[in-house]
Image (cartoon, grey):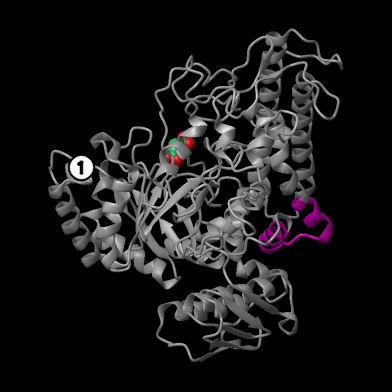
Amino acid sequence: MANKGWSQLWLDYEEKQKAAGKACADQETVEVKIDGFNADCRIIKSAVKELKRALAGDAVKVTLAKNEKIAKEGYVVDKNVVSASDCRGALYGVFHLIRARLMGQEYADIAADHAPSNPLRMMNHWDNMDGSIERGYSGRSFFYVNDEIVVDERTVDYARFMASIGINGIVINNVNVKWAATDLITTRFFDKVKELSDVFEDYGIRLYLSLNFASPIELGGLPICDPLDESVINWWKDKIKEVYDHLPNLGGFLVKADSEGRPGPFTYGRTQADGANMLGDIIAPYGGIIIWRCFVYNCTQDWRDTKTDRARAGYDYFKGLDGEYHENVILQIKNGPMDFQIREPISPLLGGLTKTNQMLEVQIAQEYTGHQIDLCYLIPMFKEILGFKTYCKEGADTVADVVSGRTMGNKLAGMAAVINTGNDFNWTGNDLAAANLYGFGRLAYDTDLSAEEIAREWVRLTFNLDAELEDKLVDMLLRSREIYEKYTSPLGIGWMVTPHDHYGPSVDGYEYSRWGTYHRADHLGLGVDRTDKGTGYAQQYYSPNAEMYNDPNTCPENLLLFFHHIPYTWKLKSGQSLIQYIYDSHFEGCKEAEELAETWKEFEGKVSERSFANVSERFGRQVYNAREWRDQVNSYFYRKSGIEDEKGREIY
Ligand code: GCW
């Protein structure tokens, strides 16, 4: 499909057909019978089209059967019969059948019965209308060029990819809504947004917009945007009516308020609930929802202030309002209390809120995890997050339970990812970063899948490798997160990155700044005291998590420096001192990155030339990066501590 100008990712039917020796695949061999569904339903039409393309060359009759007993958006596949109670479910079942065939299963062996774990499975784009992407590492936006919306064949392929992994909601613009993006809710853009929303609807995807909370000022010319002010409320009523007149299928709005300089209710002495509920009430008659982000913290901190703790902020601002949010409002909570670091504890708001709709936000854009240059397969991290036991309730208390709505019976619940795509040929900068794109969708649909199962599916669908190389690639993916962690910031402390850009090391880069992201290293030790004697953050968890984190002897070691200020001479469970651990892990992580690069050489001639070159170039840069990290971190802590490496290695 190279002639298209973009890759077909895991849906490269032609390649698969070629690999299976079906060079001139004929779509006419595929017959589709529709039993009980409306054949005019746009989603069913897409399903039929997809089946014909994907299965071309197979002499097969596929039946799409309506069965009211099947869970919403779920499906049952039995050989060549796909059953579902709704059109989305049928489409997902069709993609299951396609997946099974592409992975080499015979029709006779295909059997599946799935219901989605999460009602909302969303992608958040941080695309700006000038075509740039905040934290984008894969080229420019494919939604916007020079403040105009583009809808073309690539958009259709994008929607197909998202539907194939079960995504049912997409936010098309950056949460930092500035400049032209504020106009997305005006006549200037309605027609184009509608066109895009129609493409999405064909694939069962709802379009959502990020909203500028100050729109009444910026678009309406009002002097304020106080959520309790009558004139502001009336302005929003008119505006939202106008929006729904033009975009009847809009899912709702995502709002970043009072965060990193964005406007919000705090300016007027109002609460986050005041802001969210005002919009929620106005949008409710249209069936829309308000997704309100909890990324609210003081970003003008004085580094000498050791009592203020950014990690505490989300809980401090939102927990007290638990129960006040209206039914069509959902809080979107980042997985950790800080900001998508390579390792963080789980946000105590997840499950900490017991009377509020909540969803999990993760980031597959690799802002702090290697910019899609370094290999970092994130699904193992997401599995840890989902598996975390919050103790918010007897039974059904993991994060997976909470965000699926199971714990508290919420209808609005789910998972969102900050997406890692752009207009690069391969969509994700690094070919291997598509594993995170694929994996997030699959995991959000089925949180029981393992990181390995997902990796294997993706590898098998994307490449045509023999069993040995397939195993090798799966293994590389599975090890990559820990490797990245080893050569970057140790034991949960985070940051140490080049300020603003967030790629490459700068141990003190954020140490004396206003962002609240300190490691607090001195000549005796490092880490942040977040215990009851420190900032008290550990107390935001339920028992026994609170006690576990509070004590350095029971705190999981990979989070030791997040919760405690630890002397360099502290003995870890391995018997190693903290300083020796820092040296060893950095040497080791770097060596392992070099090994990844070395192993990739075996893939020459086994994947396309383009893929081989792309990934080789990335590994080259990863190795360089890993060495930089190793040397900067090790020499920084050697100079600070004055303690020699036991193994006598050269520390620059
Ligand atoms: O981590 C920070 C990023 C910002 C981002 C913000 C957020 C969209 O560095 O680029 O802004 O998080 O999540 O709102």
Q: What residue appears at the point 76 percent right and 40 percent down from the top-left corner?
A: 596
Image coordinates of residue 327 in percent, x first then y, are 37, 61
**x, y percent for residue 355:** 45, 55
Residue 136 highlighted magenta (yes or no): no
Determine the quadrant in which ligand 1 lies: top left
| Dominant secondary structure (helix, strand or loop) of the stretch shown in magenta | helix
State whether residue 364 is above or below residue 345: below
Instruction: Specify start and end residues of the magenta stretch as a single range.
Output: 453-474
- Whole-percent x and y of residue 524? 69, 11
Residue 546 percent location from the top left of the image = 63, 37
Q: Is residue 294 above or below residue 64?
A: above
Q: Mark 1: is the Cβ under 8 angstroms from ligand 1?
A: no
Q: Is residue 469 magenta?
A: yes
| Residue drawn at 66 percent across, 29 percent down | 488
Mark 1 crowdedness (10 Å alpha carbons): few <14, some 14-19, many ≥20: many
Answer left or right for 267 relative to 579: left
At horizontal 52% and vertical 47% (from top left) the residue drawn is 352
Look at mark 1 in the image and give the residue it sits on: 225
The reply to whether residue 56 is in sight is no
Q: Quadrant of residue 19?
A: bottom right
Residue at image position (43%, 66%) is 205
User: 33 and 289: which one is in front?
Assistant: 289
572 left or right of 397 in image? right
Q: Amino acid at mark 1?
A: Cys
